[in-house]
Amino acid sequence: MIAEDSVLLRIGLVKVLEMAGFEVAAEAGDAPGLLAAVEAHRPDLAVVDVRMPPGFTDEGVRAALSIRANSPGTAVLLLSQYVEERYAAELLATNTSGVGYLLKQRVADVEEFIEALRRVTRGGTALDPQVVAQLLVRRPSDPLDRLTPRERDVLALMAEGRSNAGIAARLTVSESAVAKHINSILAKLDLPPTDADHRRVLAVLRFLGVTG
C-alpha cells in the first residue's frame, strides 16, 4: 500500500516496488484514502508520506499511528522530505517492530531502499542515517555520554535497524567484535538481562529519547 500525494513520486514508487517483486495492492493520495485502503486490503506494508492533504502537516504520521493501533499486521514505513526525528520517536513509542522512517532521497538508492522495506516487513526497523545523526546531540548528563565513539557508531547502526552482521559489514569488523560492543553498550546504559524486555530494543529507544 502506497500513500503519497505527489503523483509522479507515487508512480515511481509503484514501479520500483513492482520491479523488486512487491505487489502493490492500492494507492492513496491522502490520509483518509490510506486508512480506507488499509482496512479494505490489509496489506503487509504501508509506505506513507509524512505530510499529506488537506493540511500537509502530520497527517501521514497520525494515519500511521492509527494503522499500528488498528491493523497491527501491517508494517509502516514513513517517508519524509526533511529530517523530523520526533515522528520516528512517536511511531516507535507505541511499537518497536515493523516500523521505518526514511528521507525520500533514499528512494534513489533502490537497493538500499528495498532492503529497508523488506526489513520492516519482516518486523524489523529502518531509520534514516540522517535522523540517527541528529539524535547524537545529547545533554551533558545523558547516559549515552558513557559510550565510546565506536560504541556510539554501533548503537547508531542498531537504531537504523541493522543486524549484527549488517553492523559488522558496515564497520568492517567481526560479528564477535560487534557483539562485544553491544554487551558493553547495554551495561553502560544500565540495561541488565531480563525476561520481560528486549534489551536491544530498549537501548535503541533510549538512544531515540523515547520513554514509557
Image (tube, rainbow, N blue to C red):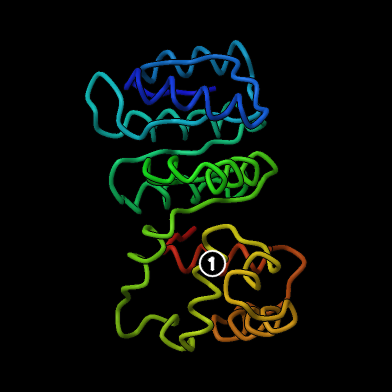
Task: Please report the residue visible at 43 percent of the width from the left and 13 percent of the height from the top.
Answer: 33
Amino acid residing under circle 1:
Leu
Task: Please report the residue visible at 48 percent of the width from the left and 15 percent of the height from the top.
Answer: 27
Label count reads: 1
As drawn, 189 above or below 28: below
The quadrant of the picture occupied by the N terminus is: top right
Left or right: 68 as drawn, with respect to 57: right
Where's residue 45, x and y in %?
A: 60, 30
Where's residue 157, x and y in %?
A: 54, 66
As drawn, 50 above or below 30: below
Where's residue 102, x and y in %?
A: 43, 46
Displayed quadrant of residue 11: top left
Q: Which residue is mark 1?
A: 157
Query: Badge 1 local density, few (<14 within 10 Å), some, or many (20+)?
Result: many
Where's residue 55, x and y in %?
A: 22, 24
Left or right: 203 as drawn, with respect to 118: left
Task: Please report the residue visible at 27 percent of the width from the left and 20 percent of the height from the top.
Answer: 53
Q: Secondary structure at mark 1?
A: helix
Left or right: 179 as drawn, with respect to 7: right
As drawn, 107 above or below 197: above
Please name whichever residue, 16 or 201, is drawn nearer the observer in this view of the structure: 16
Please name whichever residue, 121 or 197, is drawn nearer the observer in this view of the structure: 121
Task: Please report the residue visible at 43 percent of the width from the left and 60 percent of the height from the top.
Answer: 129
Left or right: 34 as drawn, with respect to 130: right
